[in-house]
Image (cartoon, grey):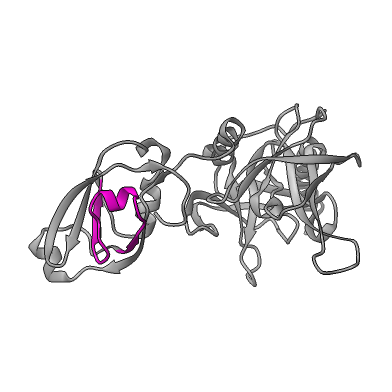
Amino acid sequence: MDKEARSDESGLLDAYSLAVADAAARVGPSVVRVEISAKAQGRSRGDERSGGSGFFFTPDGFLLTNRHVVCDSGRIEVTTADGQELRGYLVGDDPHTDLAVVRVHEAVAQPAPLGESRALRVGQIAIAIGNPYGFAWTVTAGVVSALGRTLRTGTGRLVDNVVQTDAALNPGNSGGPLVSARGEVIGVNTAMIRPAQGICFAIPIDTAMWVATALMHEGRVRRAYLGLAGQTVPLVKRLTVHHALPNASGVLVTSTEKNSPAERAGLRDGDIVVGFGDHVVTSIDDMHRLLGADVVGKTLSVDVLRGTTRVKTSIRPSDGVAHAA
């Protein structure tokens, strides 16, 4: 390799290094360590601790983190980048996106600058800042590997448009920011696939801020509730042909809750939902995507197969939180 080629390569490396260093310096002061202290039950020794990461997004002390970081009962302790130890208070959490908002009562000198996840491109620099395995304020860098992924949370719902990155994440990174080369937060780090290497996920910042706003205003995120449990099943070919159905699968109703919208609509165990509103339903994931806050209180049609008969009825989703659809 000649001297000119080595100089060009060095310049590229310096530009990359500077971009990562500048972004980390811009966002790093807003990143915190979040710990939960809970008395060990049935033990004589002191507090047990668990936790992860988070970041301030307002100057008056609101921070974002993952729900699974703060969902255990106990005192929330927030340690800032300059070493301050502050008491945190849970504002609200959303199990369907694994996000939570925590507040400290002290003013924050430097909230993180926020970007727009809808403007992301595959291949752009992605920088993760957090506290993996307790190693505080660790910076890892990679690229945005893919966009538009879906991630299933512990409640069974899917989060759409998840950002995939190869910026290394480890336990303790959860809730920390994923940052662009411009030093703007583009996601909330939330999960990695084990034992795979370089496959990590972040909730996009556009989704995270929508959830955070709802939690700050109401303490929860409104979603539509039907009161049924179901599972995806294939449809018998002769029935799809006979009823001219475009879908090859639907949602089998396995149970309905008492006095729920599903029960009031006359849905029964064994019904197969093939349509909801103006949409074709092929899976339980389709149902979850259609049950947003915008359909709460609206009267919608439900298209079901009951045995060999096609039945249409109406349902009015209510506002509630449930594990079923």
217 vs 280, left or right, is right
Magenta stretch contains residue 257 = yes
Picture residue at 29% right of the left edge, 53% below the top: 263
Can you name the residue that lies furthest to the front here? Answer: 259
The image shows a total of numbered marks equal to 0
30 vs 204, left or right, is right
Q: Is residue 81 above or below residue 244?
A: above
The quadrant of the image that shows the C terminus is bottom left
Picture residue at 38% right of the left edge, 36% below the top: 294
* Camera sees residue 18: no
Asked whether 44 or 185 is in front, the reply is: 44
235 vs 142, left or right, is left
Residue 291 place in picture, x, y as percent: 38, 46
Magenta stretch contains residue 225 = no
* Camera sees residue 163: yes
Q: Is residue 270 above or below residue 27?
A: below
Which residues lie in the magenta part? 253-276
Can you name the residue that lies furthest to the left here? Answer: 242
Picture residue at 71% right of the left edge, 47% below the top: 176
Asked whether 30 or 266 is in front, the reply is: 266
Picture residue at 62% right of the left edge, 44% below the top: 187
Asked whether 135 or 18 is in front, the reply is: 135
Residue 253 place in picture, x, y as percent: 30, 62
Quadrant of res 145: bottom right
The quadrant of the image that shows the N terminus is bottom right
Residue 117 place in picture, x, y as percent: 56, 40
Residue 231 place in picture, x, y as percent: 35, 65
Q: Is residue 6 above or below residue 196?
A: above
261 vs 102, left or right, is left
